[in-house]
Amino acid sequence: MARMTLIIGVYADDLIITSSEQEDIDAFKREMTAMFHMSDLGMLGYYLGIEVEQSNRDITLCKCAYAKKLLEQCGMGDYKPCQATMEEKLKLLKDNVVAKVDTTRYRNIVGGMRYLTHTRPDISFAVGYVSRFMEEPQEDHLAVIKHLLRYIAGTCGYGIVYSQRSTATLELSAYSDSDMVGDVNTRQSTTGVMFFLSDCPVSWQSQKQRIIALSTCEAEYIAAATASCQGTWLRRLLQELTGEVLCGPVLRVENKSAIALARNPVLHDWSKDIDIKYHYIRDCIDGGCIKLEYVETARQFGDILTQTLIRLRL
């Protein structure tokens, strides 16, 4: 007998209700209406700034209205759009001779853009990069933010599409990537991880690594270990929601040395300086929780989370 699951998303007094059976949803609504004063708004169309368009073929999530409101608040509504989030290979310094700008305004803009990344993985790296300068922002940092806002102005309608055909099978896959010493201030690298359910993105992150990698291999290895932790959690969550036993996700990495290091613990000379917690990936591989595969740079979707891509790559 198939398992029936009722899933309820709660934020304050706003609820999202979904189930494999319409009868379960209707029964829950009747119980809630009997206990509380509740309004039934029907099919989900708007939730926490996310605009939801549903059809028989797919579901689209975007934040077009929120993006336009953000641009108006920043006084960028009439600016000419641009084609990329940032200038390619741009490096910013924390301590510079450039004049400082209003810290509160800078933080408000960055905070608004961070909320936009919930449906926009294409801006995640750029938003994370400008977030590194919120302590003492300067004019060159603010100039990068204005460039990013111009990109958002030209892509307000961008979002995530989940097609019924693509999500028919529950197969997790992931891409992990890193830049080597991308932060010129701390010499730390950036980790980029993106997870797909079939071919639809469901989770992504772009963050500065906590330790300094001594080689490209180490930077990629640390990124892959971060992806392993996220993949283990996502797999368990899906199994809990569906009641099905899922295979370990395939993790695609473009560095063959990092793959060899993860698969072969004998290569200890390469990893003496890596924090013990990052060797978690080896247990994941041994237990079948993660499968590593090599992917060419041209097919590495994680690139968008570790660097500014040129117009053709976007």
Image: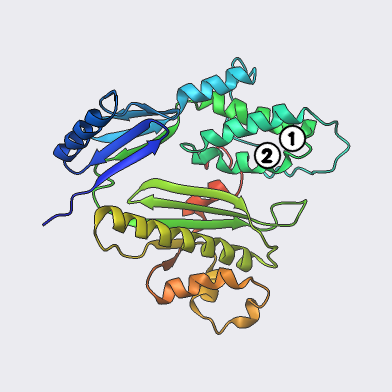
Q: Which mark is residue 130?
A: 2
The secondary element bearing badge 2 is classed as helix
From this viewpoint, which residue is outermost toward the right? 97
Q: Tell me what residue is drawn at x 45 percent, y 26 percent.
A: 157
Residue of label 1:
141
Q: Which comes before the other along the chain, label 2 or label 1? A: 2
Q: Is residue 314 visible?
A: no
- 92 w.r.t. 106: above or below: below
Left or right of 185, for residue 48: left
Amino acid under disc 2: Val
- The one nearer the camera, 126 or 280, is 280
Residue 12 seen in the figure: yes
Where residue 19 sits in the image (x, y, percent)? 22, 42
- Could you tell whether 5 is left or right of 1 in the image? right
Residue 81: name its quadrant. top right
Q: Nearer the viewer, residue 230 or 152?
A: 230
In the rendered view of the protein, which quadrant contains the N terminus? bottom left
Label 2, residues with CA under 10 Å away: few <14, some 14-19, many ≥20: some
Q: Secondary structure at mark 1?
A: helix
Q: Amino acid at mark 1?
A: His
Q: Is residue 34 above or below residue 266?
A: above
Residue at the limit of the structure toward the front, as seen here: 35
**Residue 260 location, x and y as percent?**
52, 75
Label 1 packing within 10 angstroms: few (<14), some (14-19), many (20+): many
Question: Quick check: marks 2 and 1 in contact, CB under 8 Å?
Answer: yes
The residue closer to the viewer here, 204 or 306, is 204
Q: Is residue 272 left or right of residue 22?
A: right
Residue at left 61%, top 68%?
Answer: 217
Q: Which quadrant holds residue 245?
A: bottom left
